[in-house]
Amino acid sequence: MCMKKSFKLFSCLAVVLFLAGCLSTKPHSGLDKSLPGEPLNPYAGPCAKIAVSDFELKTSGLDAQGGLSLKEYFISVLNTTKRFMIVSPLEAELIISIAVFEFIPESSGGKFGLAGGGSSASSFMGGLLGEALNKATMQLNLRIIDRASSRIISSRDIQSQAVENPGRETETPHDKAFKAGLSEYARTPMGKVIHDCLIEAARYIGQNVPLSYYKN
């Protein structure tokens, strides 16, 4: 009898931990919260001259047009910070290079319900199935490069994932920024992931461009 109760308790805890992991939408980039100020807050002052390279596509999940759309969206995010002057590579002091290693708009994220997803826990608990979850994932590498010397000033891997809430649209901040090339991702988990990754990338650049590059 005690073994049955222990088994039920263990099973419930496993389900809770599984669902908690699936519903996380936080970026996994480890932003340093200790830095003073907020790079995306309103700003008035000298700007750094930067150029954004075409995104390097290291995944089959994204085509050239999609990469260009991501670049345009990213530039619009950078412009809202008012910290940077986006110029051509020949005029820039810094080159922002981004490589996309993972772009998965939809994948099997398990089931919404007890013991879903076809895991060992699922079969162990009798295969109680629920509604399939749509999980979106994106991973990129960001580099800030001094154009004159080609020296990498700073780099960071940024990753985010989001899982849909069955029966509800995903609220994507700044939906209007999703132009024609990204419109299919508006109000979806992938839209949330794209927004989180690129906002995080802009935040990181704002925190890691040395003050010497900000000039009137």
Image (cartoon, rainbow, N blue to C red):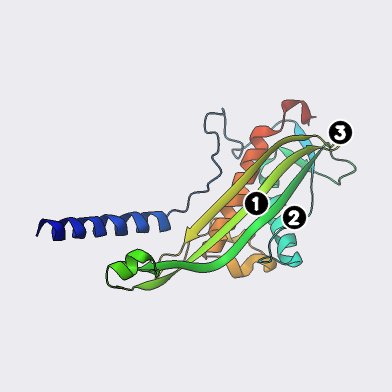
Q: Position of residue 204 (x, y in %)?
A: 63, 39
Q: Position of residue 50 (x, y in %)?
A: 79, 41
- Horizontally, is 30 left or right of 17 in the view? right
**Residue drawn at x 60%, y 51% as measured from the top left:** 197
Q: Quadrant of residue 12?
A: bottom left
Mark 2 element type: loop
Q: Position of residue 97 (x, y in %)?
A: 75, 47
Mark 3 element type: loop
Q: Which mark is residue 140?
A: 1
Q: Which mark is residue 190?
A: none
Estimate the spatial distance between the alpha carbons at disc 2 and disc 1, rounded to whole Å: 10 Å
User: Which amino acid type is marked by label 3?
Assistant: Ser
Q: Nearer the viewer, residue 141 or 119?
A: 119
Residue 114 in view, yes or no:
no
Query: In the rendered view, would you say 142 is above or below 124?
Result: above
**Residue drawn at x 29%, y 67% as measured from the top left:** 124
Q: Looking at the image, do the residues carrying marks 2 and 1 touch, with CB atoms under 8 Å apart? A: yes
Q: Which one is earlier in the sequence, the residue at label 2 or at label 3? A: 2
Quadrant of the rendering where the C terminus is positioned? top right
**Residue drawn at x 32%, y 70% as measured from the top left:** 123
| Residue that numbered label 2 is attached to | 55
Mark 1 element type: strand
| Residue that numbered label 3 is attached to | 149
Q: Which one is earlier in the sequence, the residue at label 2 or at label 1? A: 2
Q: Nearer the viewer, residue 50 or 46?
A: 50
Q: Position of residue 168 (x, y in %)?
A: 42, 68
Q: How many marks?
A: 3
Residue 94 in view, yes or no:
yes
**Residue drawn at x 31%, y 59% as measured from the top left:** 15
